[in-house]
Amino acid sequence: MRSVNECFDNVKEDYFKFLNKEKILGNSKAEKIKSLKKIYIPMSFWIDNKYRKKGKTLFIGFSGGQGSGKTTISGILEIILKDYFKREIYVSSIDDFYKTLEDRNKMSHKIHPLFLTRGVPGTHDVNLIKKFYAFIKKKKFKKFKSPKFNKLIDDRLKAKHWTNIKKRPEIVILEGWCVGAKPQLNSLLKKPINILEKNEDKDLIWRKYVNKKLREDYKNFFSMIDNFVFIKIPNFNMVFKWRLLQENKLNNKRYSKNKIMSYNKIKRFIMFYQRVTLQMLKDMPKVASIVLTLNKKHQINKIRFKN
């Protein structure tokens, strides 16, 4: 029978290489080993077990507030599932399915100016996501390309830069801040949640459209996901702090200064996400199969498996 220690010995080298590459430097080596043994390896055993029970491609939705660590944890799970379980795994981000800048420009003129800013439900190309799922599910699999979005140019890359998927994935992880989000009651939309809504969405057009998309298009594609993993953040204030750290990481990678968001721009940017994020903190712990609880030090201090 496979064991945690056997898995640890198999993946530890690639795990530490990945953490160094991603500049995950905060915790001690002992804490990183503990996280691998107590959090990431048990998660991988759980996911592999779900795949074996299903017998065909397993779709995992992975959500949590901005900067909570979805991308990093997804990368760690990919290492374990590939190195130890020998699974064909593909990790995708809902960010890569954002509508093009041109399409969002059209939305901003036709529906509401706030749709020029990517992020909220309604700014993703849901049809493209459905095509992605359909290609993977085809009886006779054929290689295809998955889109890539570049946040620094705020636009989708041209198809020649998309990711080639040559083999049918056994496990797909779709990570993104709003994956699995549910709509609110219309009555809850009336009261503005921040100054962005108060000053720039006085007539509720933006809020109502986002909510409508969650109730219809997004509900439809979220239903294609087998299981959800959710990172529960301590409070919304931490989103700003962690989003700032993300931006500083881009800065450290020597991106052009004018492409990095300023303090005030980040503060405004996260207001677009606030309403849906707060609702997800209420809803997702009830529906997610795995809930990871973060403390204010950005450490996972609790993991809960639902089934």
Image (tube, rainbow, N blue to C red):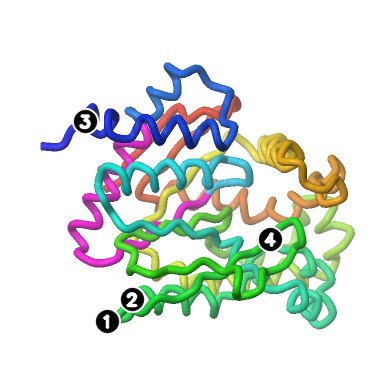
Q: Where's residue 91, x and y in %?
A: 45, 56
Which residue, given by chain and number where applicable, does mark 1 sit on?
139
Residue pictured at 82% horizontal, 48% vertical: 256
For marks 4 and 1 on the same chain, the one whose residue lies earlier in the sequence:
1
Which residue, given by chain and number where applicable, does mark 2 sit on?
137
Q: Which mark is residue 173?
A: none
Residue pictured at 28% horizontal, 34% vertical: 10
The range drawn in magenta is: 39-63
The amino acid pointed to by label 2 is: Lys
Q: Nearer the viewer, mark 2 or mark 4?
A: 4
Which class describes the residues within 10 Å of circle 1: few (<14), some (14-19), or many (20+)?
few
Q: Is residue 101 magenta?
A: no
Asked if disc 4 and disc 3 are in contact, CB closer than 8 Å, the reply is: no
For marks 2 and 4 on the same chain, the one whose residue lies earlier in the sequence:
2
| Quadrant of the snapshot with the N terminus | top left
Asked if disc 2 and disc 4 are in contact, CB closer than 8 Å, the reply is: no
The amino acid pointed to by label 4 is: Asn
Which residue, given by chain and number where applicable, does mark 3 sit on?
6
The amino acid pointed to by label 3 is: Glu
Q: CA distance from mark 4 to mark 3?
A: 38 Å
Give the prevailing secondary structure in the magenta stretch: helix
Q: Which mark is residue 150?
A: 4
Q: CA distance from mark 2 to mark 4?
A: 27 Å
Residue pictured at 40% horizontal, 28% vertical: 35
Is 287 situated left or right of 294 in this image? left
Q: Where's residue 285, x and y in %?
A: 44, 46
For marks 4 and 3 on the same chain, the one whose residue lies earlier in the sequence:
3
For marks 3 and 2 on the same chain, the one whose residue lies earlier in the sequence:
3
Q: Where's residue 11, x and y in %?
A: 33, 35
